[in-house]
Image (spheres, grey):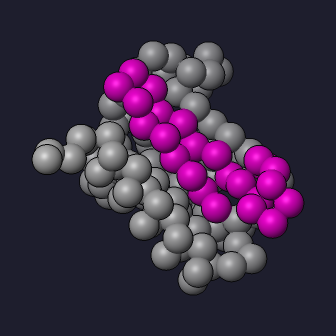
Amino acid sequence: MATSKRSLFLKRRQRVRSKLRAVNAGRMRLSIHRSSKNISAQLIDDVSGVTLASASSLEKDLGVVGKNNIDAARIVGTAIAERAKKAGVDAAYFDRGGFLFHGKVKALADAAREAGLNI
């Protein structure tokens, strides 16, 4: 029986998150989501269950509405790092979910690191 692409993605996401939570207890989580048309990032405090900052390519002030390319990922990564600093967070762990760490996901992480977020 063939395993669907979606079920493999969900298994990979659970595996990544469980390993990260075990190692990085007490730190904030930088979670990303990549769709076919947009990319977004959230800074989440898992202890209290609150989203502290978020950035998305859907925001008009970022200037990349409806784009999902590497340049948009860099802009979103820079924006989430700046908003994290405003929220008083300088370190987080990078939760890529079930997405592979290359292309847009890597560009977002590198831009956040360059902007001063320790991930």
Is residue 75 visible from the viewing direction of this image? no
As drawn, the residue found furthest toward the bottom would be 23
Q: Where is residue 50 in the image (x, y as percent from the top left)?
A: 81, 51
Q: Residue at x 14, y 45 (%)?
A: 2
Q: Which of 69 and 82 is in front in this view?
A: 69
Image: 23 above or below 16: below
Principal SS element in the magenta part?
strand
Q: Nearer the viewer, residue 65 or 95?
A: 95
Quadrant, the C terminus: bottom right
Tell whether position 36 is magenta: yes
Q: Where is residue 81 in the image (x, y as percent from the top left)?
A: 63, 52
What range is drawn magenta here?
A: 29-52
As drawn, the residue found furthest toward the left would be 1
Q: Position of residue 77 (x, y in %)?
A: 53, 46
Q: Which residue is drawn at 64% across and 46% down?
A: 42
Examine the image and state in which quarter residue 11 appears.
bottom left
Seen in the image, is 55 located left or right of residue 94? right
